[in-house]
């Protein structure tokens, strides 16, 4: 096999195997799932033993059957990609020139988290390194490694954002902070970086908007307010002072429902939404306010009370409707 270019294995955002030759080709679809699992396990291990590998990949069968399955998978893998795996006694490992995206991610994170002092280490990773490990795979060893890599990536992205901001490269810093937010939308430390970078640039309105978005999302999902670390960032920002962001939004809602839209909601407390309802004496739409209660999500929220007003009409009240049937 022509080894002028390295074999490349990808595990982020799905399994892939690129073999060198006159033209690079993908061999992932040619490998049975058992062989893919073997190769993925070896990519995530430094020097795995045959016994440990067989036990991880075939945990529900007798040991001799597991070793037989391992031998069969190794034979198939060597047939598809000769020299990809090196066996030394009881140990198995990938050939040294094999490239693995997970290892590239680990190398980038180490450079970022333990910087040498040069600005060349301060860079966002390739977008290919931002995916989750083997989505759709639910083996225990995959789940543990997926969470470890997720945390490593988040910590590294935040470290990059901090260092870029300290160098005055605020645009790149925001990209790194937003990448962390996309990876974990409820991660407060990532949102704090977004708010802080906006403030460092003097973009007060952007900082207030970012804070309000996070506060609303946190209340909707977890029913808790932002921490003191977050609120202190915006305590001098007009309209979003510490502990008053929700009150500010409620003030807007009371005086201009169409502007505020969805009110604050947490822990099962009622919320309300402003909109219009078809009908009315003139055949047009009429203003409507729905009071909602229940959990977030379609089918889990109920209209427990509604007050509809229009010109020349008396208020009407309804209750017990599925909120999914009414959209403003």
Image (cartoon, rainbow, N blue to C red):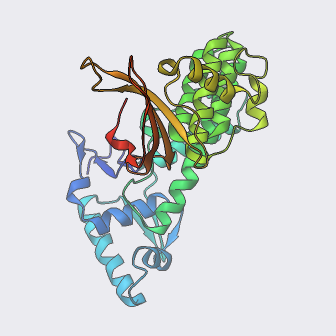
Image point 60% across, 47% down: which residue? Answer: 222
- Residue 86 % position (x, y): 42, 64
| 273 to 297, vertically: above or below | above
Tell me: 308 left or right of 153. left
- Residue 82 visible here: yes
Frontmost residue, 321 versus 197: 321
| 236 to 291, vertically: above or below | above
Image point 27% across, 26% down: which residue? Answer: 279
Tell me: 193 left or right of 15. right
Tell me: 166 left or right of 82. right
- Residue 17 % position (x, y): 31, 50
Frontmost residue, 233 versus 131: 233
- Residue 318 % position (x, y): 41, 42
Frontmost residue, 63 versus 97: 63
| 175 to 270, vertically: above or below | above
- Residue 100 visible here: no
């Amino acid at each position: 096999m022509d080894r002028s270019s390295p074999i490349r294995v990808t595990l982020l955002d799905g399994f892939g195997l690129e073999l060198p030759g006159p033209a690079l080709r993908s061999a992932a679809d040619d490998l049975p799932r058992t062989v893919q699992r073997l190769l993925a396990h070896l990519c995530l291990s430094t020097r795995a033993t045959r016994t440990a590998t067989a036990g991880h990949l075939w945990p529900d069968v007798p040991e001799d059957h597991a070793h037989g399955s391992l031998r069969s998978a190794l034979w198939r893998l060597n047939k598809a990609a000769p020299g990809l795996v090196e066996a030394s006694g009881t140990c198995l490992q990938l050939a040294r020139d094999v490239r693995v995206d997970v290892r590239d991610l680990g190398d980038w994170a180490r450079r970022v988290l333990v910087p040498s002092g040069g600005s060349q280490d301060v860079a966002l990773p390739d977008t290919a390194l931002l995916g989750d490990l083997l989505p759709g795979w639910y083996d225990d060893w995959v789940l543990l490694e997926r969470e470890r890599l997720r945390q490593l990536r988040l910590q590294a992205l935040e470290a990059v954002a901090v260092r870029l901001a300290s160098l005055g490269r605020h645009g790149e810093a925001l990209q790194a902070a937003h990448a962390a937010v996309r990876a974990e939308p409820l991660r407060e430390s990532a949102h704090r970086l977004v708010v802080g970078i906006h403030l460092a640039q003097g973009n007060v309105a952007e900082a207030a908007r970012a804070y309000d978005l996070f506060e609303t999302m946190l209340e909707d999902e977890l029913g808790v307010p932002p921490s003191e670390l977050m609120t202190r960032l915006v305590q001098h920002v007009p309209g979003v002072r510490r502990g008053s962001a929700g009150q500010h939004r409620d003030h807007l809602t009371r005086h201009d429902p169409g502007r505020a839209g969805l009110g604050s909601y947490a822990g099962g407390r009622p919320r309300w939404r402003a909109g219009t309802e078809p009908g009315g004496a003139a055949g047009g739409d009429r203003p409507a306010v729905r009071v909602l209660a229940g959990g977030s999500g379609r089918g889990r929220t109920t209209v427990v009370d509604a007050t509809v007003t229009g010109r020349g009409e008396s208020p009407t009240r309804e209750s017990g409707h599925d909120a999914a049937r009414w959209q403003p």
